[in-house]
Amino acid sequence: MTSDTTSWDRAALALRLLCVPDADLGGAVIRMRASPARDHVLTQVAPLQPRKIHPTISDDQLFGGLDLAATLNAAQVVENKSFFHSRCTALLTMSERCGPDLAAKLAQQLDSGAGHMIVALDEGAEPDEAAPPALTERLAFHIAPEGRAPAGWPSDTPPVPAGTPLTPADVTVSGSDIETLTSLAAVFGIDSLRAPSLALRAARAHAAMHGRKAVDESDLNAAAELVYPQRATRVPQEPEDQSQDPPPPPEDAPDDDGAGDSESFELPDGDMLVDAVKALLPADLLAGLVPAGTTRSQTGGGAGMKRKGNRRGRPLPSRPGRLDGRARIDLVATLRAAAPWQPLRNAAVPAGTPPRQGLQIRPADIRLKRYQEQSDRLLIFAVDASGSAAMSRLNEAKGAVELLLGQAYAARDHVALIAFRGAEAELLLPPTRSLVQTKRRLASLPGGGGTPLAAGLQQAALLAEQSRARGLSPTVVILTDGRANIALDGTANRQTAQSDAEKMAGLLTAQNIAGLVIDMSNRPQDALRSLAARMQAPYIALPRADAERLTGAVSAALEG
């Protein structure tokens, strides 16, 4: 396997920046499988003296608490120290298995301002196996070198500043530096302010490491290349060529009052910096497009809704509990919980009592088995077939849905098709697994008329609620250009139509139905972005993507 020298050089730089004193970078995600190469990478963070923690760490170990054995032995209260009782670096192994509860607790420690750092080892074999976003967005770097490490890695070392080494606090930044990093984050669709904040800290650490008292262009470039690529949610597009006149609208298309004709986001000055980050974007960015913080964890990922049980499904860590005749005991975990207490329990036996044979098991030692089972998923496609959508990219939307249908068929998902045009929405195909029938209905879908977006959302919400009652896990995929102009009562009123659409989006949120909004207009629509936020759903604007790229983005968002 050929080595990617550039990725290893970036990894070396990120690891050196982590070791800069008082850099306050939060830490890094190291996405590598267990191997000698990863061990070699971890040697570079040895100066931080990291201490290992596991995703199953208990609250007593993490935050401290009563040490019962020591308390009984000393006849006075003895408490364990918190893992974070002093400034430290935690090495979180198998971070892809870290649950949301532990991620929130670790994020709280990073936000405390005590200077803690976390190095998360991500061993995920699949794209959907990754450390929780609540944790990773607080870690500055994502380290995933490709291939084998070059001979002598890490080879280059920063120059040693003359005199007293500088710290990041000694480095000054200008307002234009802050504006540059913030604008650059917006260009790549990064909506969290943590990203430019971490990039600014990385730039100051980079300057201090090279003995500079002020941030310059090379520091900004290094920081942006290390912090932004894995956080990007879109690829900056070149300005659209306006030299050609747009095609005339269909005769039955409603008049367009200019809604959605806002100018596309323009790139800030400094194209070299944009190009540098753009060159480092993952090759499958569109296929992995899942805006951070927009998906709801209650609804599982690529399969249906997850439900905990005690009989079948994927095994989960056992938990303390009482035997009630239905739960199944985890014998190994129970014995493991009881074993450490045997010396104390044997010593507590009154004098003269015959010795007991075997282990002493108490109710508190009982551990019960848990399993996680998944229901079938239903993909509800609500497709805009209005005149404005037909003028935009209805054919490409049809092609994308057909490709997605093939994937759904392979995964044995159910699919349903809703079309909205004219003054109402129509259920073209109820939930089915028939690929041929779905494609036939989709191919015959005509275009023209008004855009009753609210009616489409209402029909999707009704179908989703009905399917949930039958044990399915619904996900609503909206494909539209966002130019809603038909209200729920059938009247042509843009303001009322948009208001009704917002209400229906709120209904989907209240029903806790997962959703996805695809903007298939020629230019991104602010109204659709607001609608997606109301639905608490990802928003994907792909104004110049073909069917296959659109399909990759939708598939990844559904699996996120």
Image (cartoon, rainbow, N blue to C red):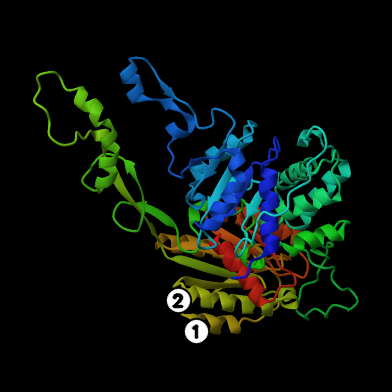
Residue 467 in which image quadrant = bottom left
Identify which residue is drawn at 38% across, 25% down. Answer: 67
Q: Considering only vertical position in the picture, is 509 above or below 26?
A: below
Identify which residue is drawn at 64% across, 33% down. Answer: 115
39 on left or right of 214: left
Q: Considering only vertical position in the picture, is 167 above or below 476?
A: above
Give the amino acid at mark 1.
Val
Residue 138 in which image quadrant = top right
User: Mark number for residue 433?
Assistant: 2
Residue most toward the top?
76
Counting from the top left corner in percent of width and height, residue 184 is at 79, 54
Q: Can residue 190 be seen?
A: no
Identify which residue is drawn at 48% across, 67% down. Answer: 378
**Neighbour tally class for label 1: few under 14, some 14-19, many 20 plus, Cα within 10 Å:** few
Counting from the top left corner in percent of width and height, residue 167 is at 76, 35
Counting from the top left corner in percent of width and height, residue 45 is at 61, 44
**Neighbour tally class for label 2: few under 14, some 14-19, many 20 plus, Cα within 10 Å:** some
Q: Nearer the viewer, residue 371 or 440?
A: 371
Check the picture and name the quadrant holding the C terminus.
bottom right
Identify the element where label 1 is drawn: helix
Give the amino acid at mark 2.
Arg
Q: Which residue is mark 1?
A: 436
Identify which residue is drawn at 73% across, 58% down. Answer: 527
Residue most toward the right?
243
Identify the element where label 2 is drawn: loop
Residue most toward the front?
152
Q: Can residue 261 be seen?
A: yes
